[in-house]
Amino acid sequence: MRIVFIGPPGAGKGTQCGRLAAALQIPHLSTGEMLRATRGASALGKLVASYIDQGQLAPDYLVMRILVKRLEQPDCVDGYLLDGFPRNLDQVQLLDDHLEQQDQSLDWVLDLQVQEDELVRRLMKRAESEDRADDNLATIRRRLTVFHDQTAPLLSHYRQRGLAVAIDGMQSPDAVFADIMKVVKR
Ligand code: AMP
């Protein structure tokens, strides 16, 4: 099964993706984590860090290159869960092209919905407990704006294709997960 998980920062994507990937026994592919892993002293590492730290999207070609390398690993043959990709309409096209080349298609696009004030509250709490350089109020606001401007339009696109299903992310983590499982078992 190939699933795309879309949700604003702070919606609980990471947690739910971890649980879903374990339940379906498919790899959880987070482009945010892949990019954070390339941070470092190299020219590429510095470039990547500059985008992440400003809450801006890294260049599409760069993210796609890193992602395709991962998709080519043998553990992705039976499916995968994409967390944080695609994030704009150009990335939708890149993913479609890749899937078409492989004669594959997506099964679901899960749309995890959480109200904005709750997202800010959760992200500020995460900033206190985790050491993520992009969890400060200014960057959080920018990441939410980037989500609304660039990523949210993907949802109507995937809805039109009959792939997107809305999940109420305001519930407890267990209730959210139960709703997700109901969808993927359909
Ligand atoms: P995340 O962990 O998904 O919240 O991603 C953290 C940061 O990594 C984002 O704010 C972006 O700077 C970068 N990033 C992650 N995924 C992508 C993507 N698909 N395209 C561009 N930048 C990305």
Image (cartoon, helix red, strand yellow):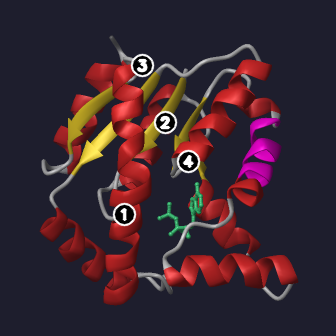
What crowding class fits label 1: few (fewer than 14 Cα within 10 Å), some (14-19), or many (20 or more)? many
Report how far apart the C-alphas of labels 3 and 4 lie in the structure: 17 Å
Q: Pointers 2 and 4 in contact (CB under 8 A)?
A: yes
Whole-percent x and y of residue 4?
49, 36
To which quarter of the image does residue 60 belong?
Answer: bottom right
Q: In which quarter of the image is ligand 1?
A: bottom right
Residue 16: x and y in percent read: 37, 46
Any atom of ligand 1 within 8 Å of the CB at mark 4? yes
Q: Is mark 1 within 8 Å of ligand 1?
A: yes
Q: Residue 178: in sight, yes or no?
A: yes
Q: Nearer the viewer, mark 3 or mark 2?
A: 3
Q: What stretch is highlighted in magenta?
A: 64-72
Q: Name the residue under label 3.
A: 161
As drawn, 185 above or below 38:
above
> Going from the N terminus, do you reach mark 1 or mark 2 first?
2
Question: Badge 2 is on which residue?
Answer: 4
Graded by Cα atoms within 10 Å as few (under 14), some (14 to 19) or many (20 or more), the crowding at tag 4 reads many
Q: Please give the label number shown on residue 46.
A: none
Is there CB contact under 8 Å for labels 3 and 4?
no
The residue beneath circle 4 is: 85
Residue drawn at point x = 50 percent, y = 86 percent: 133
Q: In this view, does 112 lie above or below 53?
A: above
The majority secondary structure of the magenta stretch comes to helix
Q: Helix, strand, or loop for circle 2?
A: strand
Q: How crowded is mark 3: few (under 14 residues within 10 Å), some or many (20 or more)?
A: few
